[in-house]
C-alpha cells in the first residue's frame, strides 16, 4: 500500500469513529487494506493503493462528503516520509489560542480596532507587513513590562501542541516556532512548549515603553517561506520530510512549501489552499497524521 487515509476524531468529544464507518470509507478507496486503530474510537489509518495520477485533495473532498456532519478531520497522503523531520509552526491562534497583539492592544483600550486589522490581515485582505506596522503604532507608550502579565493572565496554549512538539522531537525531528508576532512572546511560548528555536518580530522599546515601531525587515509570509527552505537545506532534507501549520494568510508560503502543510482552524482561503486541514480537533491530530499511535505520545 502506497497511501494512507487518516481519520481523527476530537479528543474533547465523544468518539466519532467505529468499525462500521471505517469499513464504509474503505469502500471508497482504491485497493484499500484493513483499517488500523491509532487510538480506538478516535484515530485510525486506512491504507490504500491508488492508480497513477491520483489526486489526494479530490479523494479528501469525497471522504468529507461521505462523513457529512461527523466531526472528523482527515489526511490523505503517501506513506513515504510520513513521519516528518522538520516542523515549523505559527504561534498566534495556532500554538496559542489568542492573538498576542490583540491582547496588548486591550490594555490601551484599542483591542477592537487592532482585532479588526488582525482579522483582515489573516484573511489575506491586507498586506501583512503593512498591517503589522499599523497595529504596532497603536501600542505607542505602553509599558513593555506588561508582556509578562499578558502571558500569564491571557495567553493559553492550544491543546495538543506540547505533546505534538515533544513527541516529534523525541523521535528526532527539529521544531521551530516561526511567528509574525513578537519575540517577547515567542521566546517564552517556545520554551514552555519545547521548541528547538523561535523566530519572530522585535518590538522596539525606549525607556521601558513601546515606541510604536517594529524592527525591520518584518517577518511575514515570505520570511516564513524562506525560513522553511533554509532549515530544510541546512538539514539535508527533502520537501516531503517537512511539515508546517498555521491559520492565517501569512502562513501560506510555508504551508505550501512543506511536504505536509496544515491549516489549523484556519481562515477559509488558508483551509482551501493547504494540503490538509484540522477543523475539529486539537494539535495532536498532527501526530496521528504522521502515523503515531496514542501509546507513542510523549508526555
Image (tube, helix red, strand yellow):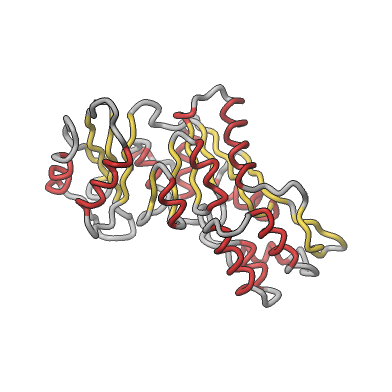
Please identify the quadrant where the N terminus is shown: top left
The x, y position of residue 121, in whole percent, is 58, 59
Residue in view at x 60 percent, y 42 percent: 224
Residue, x 19% and y 51% (percent of image)?
66
Quarter of the rendering containing residue 26: top left
Quadrant showing the C terminus:
top left
Of 237 and 38, which appears nearest the observer?
237
Total numbered badges shown on the rendered structure: 0
Residue 160 position within the rendered picture, expressed as x and y whole percent measured from the top left? 43, 51
Left or right, 261 with reference to 218: left
| Residue 153 in sight in this render | no
Task: Point out the residue furthest to the bottom here.
Answer: 109
Q: Farthest right residue?
A: 207
Q: Position of residue 167 (x, y in %)?
A: 45, 39
Q: Please state which of residues 54 and 170 is positioned toward the viewer in this rendering.
A: 54
Residue at the top extreme of this rendering:
236
**Placement of 299 over or under 96, stated as above or below:** above
The vertical placement of 185 against 40, above or below, is below
Residue 101 against residue 233 in the figure, above or below:
below
Position of 185 with respect to 90 (left or right) is: right
What residue is shown at x 52% (from left), y 52% (from top)?
95
Residue 98 shows in the view: yes
Amino acid at each position: 500500500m502506497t497511501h494512507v487515509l487518516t481519520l481523527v476524531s476530537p479528543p474533547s468529544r465523544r468518539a466519532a469513529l467505529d468499525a462500521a464507518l471505517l469499513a464504509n470509507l474503505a469502500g471508497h478507496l482504491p485497493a484499500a487494506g484493513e483499517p488500523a486503530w491509532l487510538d480506538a474510537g478516535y484515530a485510525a489509518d486506512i491504507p490504500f493503493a491508488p492508480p497513477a495520477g491520483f489526486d489526494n485533495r479530490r479523494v479528501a473532498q469525497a471522504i468529507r462528503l461521505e462523513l457529512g456532519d461527523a466531526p472528523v478531520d482527515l489526511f490523505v497522503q503517501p506513506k513515504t516520509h510520513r513521519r516528518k523531520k522538520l516542523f515549523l509552526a505559527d504561534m498566534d491562534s495556532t500554538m496559542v489560542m489568542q492573538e498576542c497583539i490583540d491582547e496588548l492592544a486591550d490594555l490601551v483600550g484599542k483591542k477592537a480596532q487592532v482585532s479588526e486589522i488582525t482579522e483582515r490581515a489573516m484573511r489575506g485582505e491586507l498586506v501583512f507587513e503593512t498591517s503589522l506596522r499599523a497595529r504596532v503604532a497603536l501600542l505607542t507608550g505602553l509599558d513593555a513590562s506588561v508582556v509578562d502579565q499578558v502571558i500569564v493572565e491571557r495567553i493559553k496554549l492550544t491543546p495538543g501542541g506540547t505533546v505534538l512538539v515533544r513527541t516529534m522531537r523525541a523521535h528526532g525531528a527539529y521544531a521551530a516556532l516561526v511567528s509574525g508576532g513578537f519575540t517577547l512572546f515567542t521566546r517564552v511560548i517556545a520554551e514552555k512548549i519545547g521548541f528547538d528555536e523561535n523566530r519572530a518580530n522585535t518590538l522596539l522599546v525606549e525607556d521601558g515603553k513601546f515606541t510604536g515601531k517594529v524592527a525591520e525587515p518584518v517577518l511575514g509570509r515570505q520570511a516564513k517561506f524562506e525560513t522553511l527552505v533554509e532549515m530544510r537545506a541546512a538539514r539535508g532534507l527533502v520537501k516531503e520530510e517537512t511539515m508546517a501549520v498555521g491559520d492565517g494568510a501569512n502562513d501560506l508560503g510555508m504551508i505550501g512549501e512543506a511536504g505536509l502543510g496544515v491549516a489549523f482552524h484556519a481562515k477559509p482561503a488558508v483551509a482551501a489552499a493547504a494540503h490538509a486541514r484540522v477543523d475539529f480537533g486539537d494539535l495532536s491530530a498532527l501526530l496521528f497524521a504522521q502515523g503515531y499511535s496514542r501509546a507513542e505520545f510523549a508526555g
